[in-house]
Amino acid sequence: MVNWAYAAGPGGAPESSPMWTFMAPMVLMVVIFYFLLIRPQQKKAKEHRQFLDNLKRGDRVITTGGLCGEITAINDQIVTLEVADKVRLEVGRPYIAGFAPKK
């Protein structure tokens, strides 16, 4: 039979460490993630929303799929691009990645 009185060690119950020794590194990691990951991503998303809001007819853009074209029509959700003579494609507005280089 095992004597359980000796299993806990000579001090009895184990000592607990202060709560801040656990919380301080966790808070520090959250702050680092915020400044290195979350904040720059939010800033980039805000810039892209402003870019999409300022699109106008005649702009030459590139889509996330890699198609380049000139905007011939635009509304709230759909952008019509002319990618070649008499070839027009409708693309969702959020899928416009940026301005395309001039021809």
Image: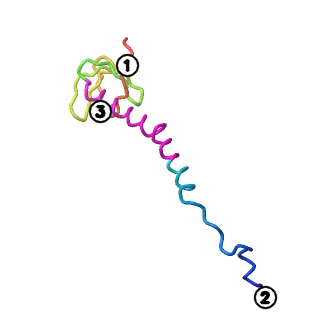
Residue for point 28% across, 31% down: 90
Where is residue 42 shown, x and y percent of the image? 38, 37
Q: Is residue 10 left or right of residue 74?
A: right
Q: Residue 46: where, in percent of width, then height?
A: 33, 33
- Magenta residue check for 71: no
Mark 2 belongs to which amino acid? Met
Vertical side of 61 occupied by 19: above or below:
below
- Per the picture, the main secondary structure of the magenta-coloured stretch is helix
Question: In this orientation, which residue lies closer to the viewer: 70 or 42?
Answer: 42
Left/right placement of residue 64 relative to residue 60 reads right
Q: Which residue is mark 2?
A: 1
Residue 16 pos. (x, y %): 61, 65
Among the two numbered marks 3 and 2 on one chain, the one whose residue lies closer to the N terminus? 2
Whole-angstrom CA distance, mark 1 to mark 2, is 81 Å
Which residue is tagged 3? 93
From the viewer's side, name the closer residue of 49 and 63.
Answer: 49
